[in-house]
Image (spheres, rainbow, N blue to C red):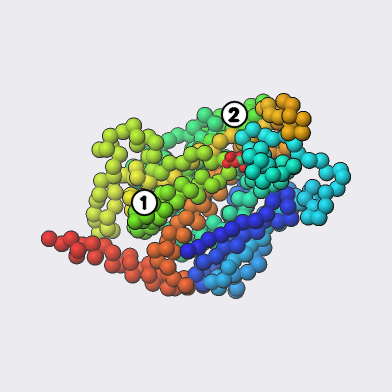
Amino acid sequence: MIRFLTAGESHGKSLVTIIDGFPSNLPISLDYINFHLKRRQQGYGRSTRMKIESDAANILSGIRFGKTIGSPISILIENKDWVNWIEEMDLEKKSKETPRVTIPRPGHADLVGSTKYNFNDIRNSIERSSARETAARVAAGTVARKFLEHFGISIGSYVESIGDVYSSKKFFNSLLANKKTAIESGWSISLKADKSILRLLDKSQGENIVKKLKSIKKNGDTVGGTFITIATGIPVGLGSFMQYDQRLDADIAFYFMSINAVKGIEIGSGFSSAEKTGSQVHDEIIFNKEGFSRSSNNAGGIEGGISNGSPIIVRSAMKPISTLAKPLNTLDLGTMKKVSARYERSDITAVPACAVISESMLAWVLAKHFLVKFGGDSIQETKDNFDNYNNKSIKRIRTNFRK
Ligand SMILES: Cc1cc2nc3c(=O)[nH]c(=O)nc-3n(C[C@H](O)[C@H](O)[C@H](O)COP(=O)(O)O)c2cc1C
């Protein structure tokens, strides 16, 4: 079973991740990891921090001569902004001048974190609850993505809406219709979306969205949105219905909902399927020389908690950023008087970045279930297991049921 942990504060020296359980001999380069770290930092609406940080991975272990060696992979990402926070983040002692943060922001982790961990300075909550941590997750997810690429699985994402401005649903509908022409691969979607600062595939709403973001910024406000994450090349059989916690859809929901500010997800036609009839929703089963497939993909590639071979389609909702330049009311915990919430440098929207982070979360959860099914201590052993299953599983089904 693969696993990873992250460590590091938003304005601390660095972020770290330890990634455990990947087989040996998987080729992976520093450039590849840095390429995906950079993608997380793009997008309209981000704060000036993105100009300070230019994330670069420092691989400390687990890779030798360009390949994994089966040992834990540890990656360190420096926070370039740390030099501006040395006093606030000192490991030893607080200087007299370092002010405490006493005013919690509505919608952030400030008050709940301080209550739970018994802090007298909200800074202790802010530092770890910040989405800066997702840089380390992207590093871990990029190792998973590289692993999946070895087996023809590819992942991409695009932004569907910012606030109430939606781009055309035409492409999403063609995904649900399982149109072969809709996508070559998950990654081909990201290649297109990467060209847009808003990660839009449909540029027709680009100007409207930028206009909206400018007016939101002028009003000191923030906004969320929705994005789609897709994986293609998925074999049948990832996940299981044998136990509730082995279901692939449940695990995807867990990893996506763990992303800061993601407040809703659906798989395939999700919520809209509740309004339709069974005959409108369920995907008919087809068989041809390529094997089994489905006439449509309202299931989003998962039936009974198991991947069915169709692309996996996840749609997520990100709430508006909680730090507002024109703040909401809150209390100063020092005086218990009503005050306006604190403002500290913040994004207006981070939906495009969130979509990129979701790619890493999807890569991770798919790699996890892939290795549960196919195992292997070296990439060659995993490949042998994968090929053996692929070559035999359909033949077996046909033999088992032959009348
Ligand atoms: C990529 C990304 C960037 C974010 N940037 C900010 C930000 O600049 N300011 C802020 O208040 N929240 C930001 N957030 C959201 C907070 O991290 C999040 O709302 C907070 O951790 C509380 O968690 P919750 O919203 O999941 O309850 C960002 C989230 C993501 C995914």
- Mark 1 belongs to which amino acid? Gly
Between 308 and 97, the residue placed more toward the observer is 97
Q: Quadrant of ligand 1?
A: top right
Between 38 and 373, the residue placed more toward the observer is 373
- Image point (83%, 44%), residue name: 98
- Image point (42%, 68%), residue name: 375
- Image point (33%, 67%), residue name: 389
* Relative to 285, 47 lies left or right: right
Find numbered disc 2 in the image and state the secondary structure of the residue it sits on: helix
Name the N-terminal-most of marks 2 and 1.
Answer: 2
Find numbered disc 1 in the image and state the secondary structure of the residue it sits on: loop
Q: In the rendered view, would you say 204 is above or below 48?
A: above
**Residue bearing the label numbered 1:** 305
Quadrant location of the C terminus in the rendered image: bottom left
- Image point (74%, 42%), residue name: 120
Q: In the rendered view, would you say 64 is above or below 117?
A: below
Between 208 and 92, the residue placed more toward the observer is 92
Image coordinates of residue 99 in percent, x first then y, are 81, 41
- Mark 2 belongs to which amino acid? Lys
* Relative to 108, 101 lies left or right: right
Q: Is mark 1 within 8 Å of ligand 1?
A: no
Q: CA distance from mark 2 to mark 1?
A: 39 Å
The answer to which quarter of the image holds residue 176 is top left
Image coordinates of residue 400 in percent, x first then y, are 19, 63
- Residue sticking out furthest to the right: 96
Image coordinates of residue 193 in percent, x first then y, are 52, 45
Residue 212 is tagged as 2
Q: How many marks?
A: 2
